[in-house]
Image (spheres, rainbow, N blue to C red):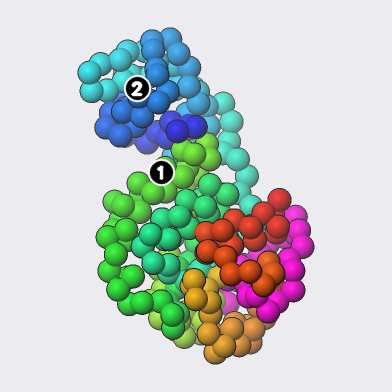
Amino acid sequence: MNMLLLDKEDFTSHGPVSVNGRRFTRLKDFIHIEVGKKIKAGVRNESCGSAEVLEIMPDQVKLDYRPESSPPPAPPLTLIIALQRPQTFSKVIHSAVTLGIKQIHFIHTFKVEKSYWQSSRLRPENLQEEIDLALEQAADPLEPQLFFHKRFKPFVEDELEKIAGSSLRLLGDPSGTAPVPLHGTPITLALGPEGGFTEYEINTLREHSFKSISLGTRILRTEFALAALLGKLLF
């Protein structure tokens, strides 16, 4: 936990912030809080700052939060990615959110098994916990928006143009060219499942002005490919 993520509901009418549950356990066991200690904190979708420990009780801690700055700027990139198998899905969420991506669209493709859509990891409470852990890691209180599209063709025909707009459209594909840094350029990046997009899906995206880019001939796990591409494109 590199930042304590606070919600408006944590603030009492008298001013102090009250934190319990998972966050309290991590503050106690990993941050080793004590009265008077200041820790990095942020209010969800509002500000970054610091919080001073006022009182430690058996099941909660009270803090005084002081806002100090705005959340870190988000990179100008929208991610479109095939829904991954459950174990990989969590890693993709963590990678994308810690790198600052604020709009993520999960789509169905031919190689995505229908059972993936029934995974417990897609339940709102589990999604929220995964997002919160990534935000705490990145010290960024600004939440991403997640969207789920269960049919490929309707997504491309009805949603894709509105999502991509005038951005540079890039498609992760081993047959493409190597990516180059594009600092400040709005980008829409599409990545397939671990088995890759089908030829039909690649051609369909190319018809919508997506240009193939590559990291080389090696086959990478999705979370590694995502992090590597974002590093090349943004940083």
Coordinates of residue 140 in the picture (x, y in percent): 52, 40
- Residue 189 painted magenta: yes
Identify the residue at horizontal 74%, vertical 69% (top origin): 178
Give the SS element for disc 1: helix
Asked if residue 196 lies left or right of residue 151, the reply is: right
Q: Nearer the viewer, residue 2 or 219?
A: 219
**Residue 55 lies in the magenta stretch:** no
Q: Which x, y percent locates residue 143?
A: 47, 48
Q: Could you tell me which residue is drawn at 43 percent across and 10 percent down?
A: 36
The residue tagged 2 is 28
Residue labelled with disc 1: 132
> Going by the picture, which residue comes out furthest to the front?
218
Give amino acid for label 2. Answer: Lys
- Residue type at mark 1 is Asp
On the rendered image, what quadrant is the N terminus found in?
A: top left
In this view, which residue lies farthest toward the left?
A: 58
Residue 159 visible here: no
Mark nearer the N terminus (2 vs 1): 2
Q: Which residues are magenta?
A: 161-190
Q: Residue at 59% of width from left, 31% of height from top?
A: 69
Label number found at residue 196? none
201 to the left or right of 62 = right
Where does the image place residue 65, in percent across and percent down from the top left? 44, 22
29 to the left or right of 145: left
The percent position of residue 99, horizontal first and vertical second, equals: 57, 49
